[in-house]
Image (tube, rainbow, N blue to C red):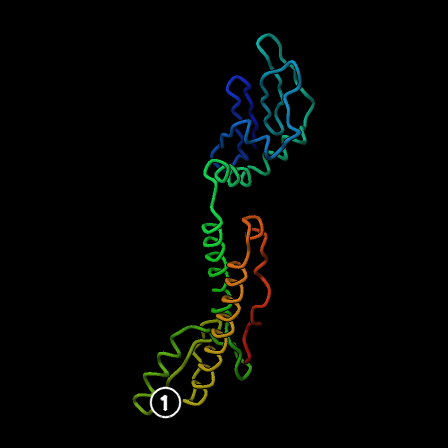
Amino acid sequence: MGFFMHNSVDDAIIISDGVVTPMSFTLAFFLTQYPAYTLPSPYTARWYEQGVEDILTNSTNSYTNTLPWSDGNTYITNVATLQTNWLDYRYPPTLAKIKSAQKGVITDYADTYYNGGVSYGGTVFQSTARPISELDQFGRQGELDPTHYILDEDNNQVSVTFQELLSICNLILGLWFETNKTLDTHKSAIDALGTISAVRAYVYTGGWPVTPFTG
């Protein structure tokens, strides 16, 4: 289980969700995230452990609250977001760096579509570079090995003719081209944004080609 600890002597707030290493934040930062947070008077410290105890203390007294503490559970649940925002608070990002990072995320996302497969003759084939390289090799030789095969989505070896290999490779190139166009569109949209919040809020999951790709 997670815990929340606040000591007003040094205004350190430490939170753990029970999975990651406990994170320490300043009270000044924490109030930018949760402005309504406060220690009930006259207490100067709080220790909350989910499902175990919620204790308020000062130099002379302590008070045990009834469980659960709903706000504390919220803080614990959101500790990963707090960590991200804490880094931004300590090291304010520039718009250029955020744009670069977001475009990297979108580029990684595009891999889903580059590798989304193509459908030909009722079979879905892997959309990798291997068939294209083999097509180039056999094209230069002027013939295709009669036992040549390419892999379907389940890694089965499917025998193909030269014309079938050519058609499948054309589908793969078509899928990559459509994916490239969508990726470039999203990157251009990111470049046009003027604020960090807009870049972070940008939705890049639309407009991608349908996979398995059919042309």
Q: Which amino acid does the dot numbered 1 rest on?
A: Pro
Image position, residue 15 (x, y; %): 54, 31
Of 35 and 172, the residue lying toward us: 35
Q: Is residue 159 above or below residue 9?
A: below
Of 28 and 161, the residue lying toward us: 28
Quarter of the image with the N terminus is: top right
Picture quadrant where residue 30 is located: top right
Image position, residue 152 (x, y; %): 47, 75
The residue shown at (49%, 78%) is: 174
Image position, residue 25 (x, y; %): 51, 30
The residue shown at (63%, 35%) is: 74
Question: Circle 1 sits on which residue?
Answer: 146
In the visual, does 22 lie left or right of 37? left
Image position, residue 115 (x, y; %): 47, 69
Q: Is residue 152 above or below residue 16?
A: below
Picture quadrant where residue 66 is located: top right
Q: Residue furthest right?
A: 66
Question: Is disc 1 placed on a helix, strand or loop?
Answer: loop
In the visual, does 10 lie left or right of 130? right
Q: Is residue 194 above or below residue 112?
A: above
Picture quadrant where residue 206 is located: bottom right
In the visual, does 43 lie left or right of 151? right
Number of numbered discs on residues: 1
